[in-house]
Amino acid sequence: MDMFCFQCEQTAQQKVCTKQGVCGKTSDCAILQDELLDGLIELANCAEENDENVKLITDGLFMTITNVNFDEIAIQEFIKKIKNNINCDFDFNIRMLWNCNEDIRSLKSLILFGVKGIAAYYHHARVLGYRNSDVEGFFFEVLKSIPKNLSKEELFNLVLKTGEINLKCMGLLDEANRKAYGSPRPRKVTTNIEKGPFIVVSGHDLKDLELLLEETKDKGINIYTHGEMLPCHGYPELNKYKHLKGNFGTAWQNQQKEFDNIPASVLFTTNCIMPVKNSYRDRVFTTSVVGYPDVVHVENDFSPVIKKALELGGYKENQKMTGINGGSVLTVGYGHDCILSIKDKIVELLKSGDIKHIFLVGGCDGAKTGRNYYTEFVKLTPKNSLVLTLACGKYRFNDLDLGEINGIPRLLDMGQCNDAYSAIKVTLELAKALDCGVNDLPLSMILSWYEQKAVCILLTLLFLGVENIRLGPTLPAFVSPNILKILVEKYKIKLITTPKEDLEEILN
């Protein structure tokens, strides 16, 4: 094998990528990312737990998430930084993990991929000045545990602890975002693009968007979000900028088509960047942990992005664009503060039967066939049900008009995958208000996964004891049959089938 990678949903033949990543990652890049992981594990076992090393571990883990960094030179430079901080002879090769007993490999993969997701969330919190000693200590604990000969029981406990720590991390990020930009409020966002120069901002990082908005004030440039940046329109301190106009395009996996010859700059702040086509390579910029070969990388200065946008000039006429179902208006801003402000009304409607069921349909979108399941599922949900959603999976249906129930929109967009904490908090508060357990609520979770942030969210739900999660479009290749059997028996995890069959089973 030239490489070994099975960390994302699209992995080759549902087994492992061995020649080149389906994501576009070369075998050389994959090997370097393995070396980066080796270095982080060695760093955790040798170096002091200080702020510099925490940042190296946080950003290093983030760089190895699917569709974040394809730049071999940037990865090599980061490895050098790690090596400079290692002061002992501890040596580890991650391929030892890929070649070990499949159940041990499965559990350690759940932990390692989960902690990569935590690192992504913690990166965003750190950017806003927030820290948590439990999260930082856990990075070192996990990276010290991977080389150890631990039992299945010990590893399963660490799997659940990964979910517990992720809950703390997501709570920290939620606090950081709300303190910096205010609590999200409902707002309608257009998919149409005005004529003139513009910049498209993709990824997840709110701070980068704020800095760009400040730098482009009064420059005659409009700013549009893309992908997981869409929920940014709900934050009062971001939508106060009049040149934050709307949202460009749909989900991340459509970027190669939607960015083809785009007359604007595109800034990637985090994942998910796809292999960049020549038709728009000269107008793509990366920042922070993101990297792609022959693409300009910027740090703390967006003047090259602005210069290119002015040079390209944007569209000559206003452009009417839509979501995948033909809608041109997307509504965002239903975070936990917003939904819990009407909690009593929701509880009353649940008790009266006006709301019969609540569905959480969310997670990652992706290019593989079968994800139209989520569109059809939402279309089939009964009119006396609410649909909560978050993450980029919502692009399958977020331009649908599902109507209202007593003034409450049936479709409630709770934000990015980074905002999964909102859904968890609402679920726990509803259970408390109805004096029942989470699994007794008239609530069903239908989730789609793609990369490692989805893994750590799933582990958080397992830590909380949530049962009957429907997961798709496929199960993780890194979960062995024996470990899957345990998860199915303990948590009743199910693979999605057809929208009609799953809906009938849920409602019956």
Image (tube, rainbow, N blue to C red):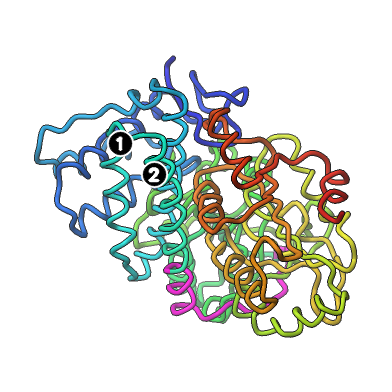
Relative vertical location of residue 491 with respect to residue 382 in this rendering, above or below: above
Tell me the kind of residue under disc 1: Leu
Q: Residue at x 62, y 63 (%)?
A: 230
- Residue at mark 1: 36
Region in magenta: 172-193
In-front residue for pair 117/234: 117
Q: How many marks?
A: 2
Give the quarter of the image for residue 351: bottom right
Q: Is residue 388 left or right of residue 173?
A: right
Determine if residue 294 is in view.
Answer: no
Residue 77 horizontal/vertical position (percent): 25, 39
Q: Quadrant of the C terminus?
A: bottom right
Residue at x-position 65% and y-position 44%: 493
State the separation of the CA atoms marked 2 and 1.
9 Å
For label 1, the crowd category at 10 Å Cα-Cα, with few meaning under 14, some 14 to 19 and many 20 or more, is: many
- Left/right placement of residue 70 relative to residue 402 reads left
Residue under the point 63% across and 52% down: 363
Q: Which mark is residue 63?
A: 2
Magenta stretch: includes residue 306: no
Q: Residue furthest top?
A: 1
Tell me which residue sits at (68%, 41%) in the image: 472
Q: Position of residue 343 (x, y in %)?
A: 69, 81
Q: Residues within 10 Å of mark 2 (few under 14, many from 20)?
A: many
The N terminus sits in image quarter: top left
Does residue 332 appear anywhere in the picture?
yes
Question: Residues at badges 2 and 1 in contact (C-beta under 8 Å)?
Answer: yes
- Image quarter of residue 428: bottom right
- Secondary structure at badge 2 equals helix
What kind of residue is marked 2?
Met
The secondary element bearing badge 1 is classed as helix
**Which badge, 2 or 1, is on the more N-terminal residue?**
1
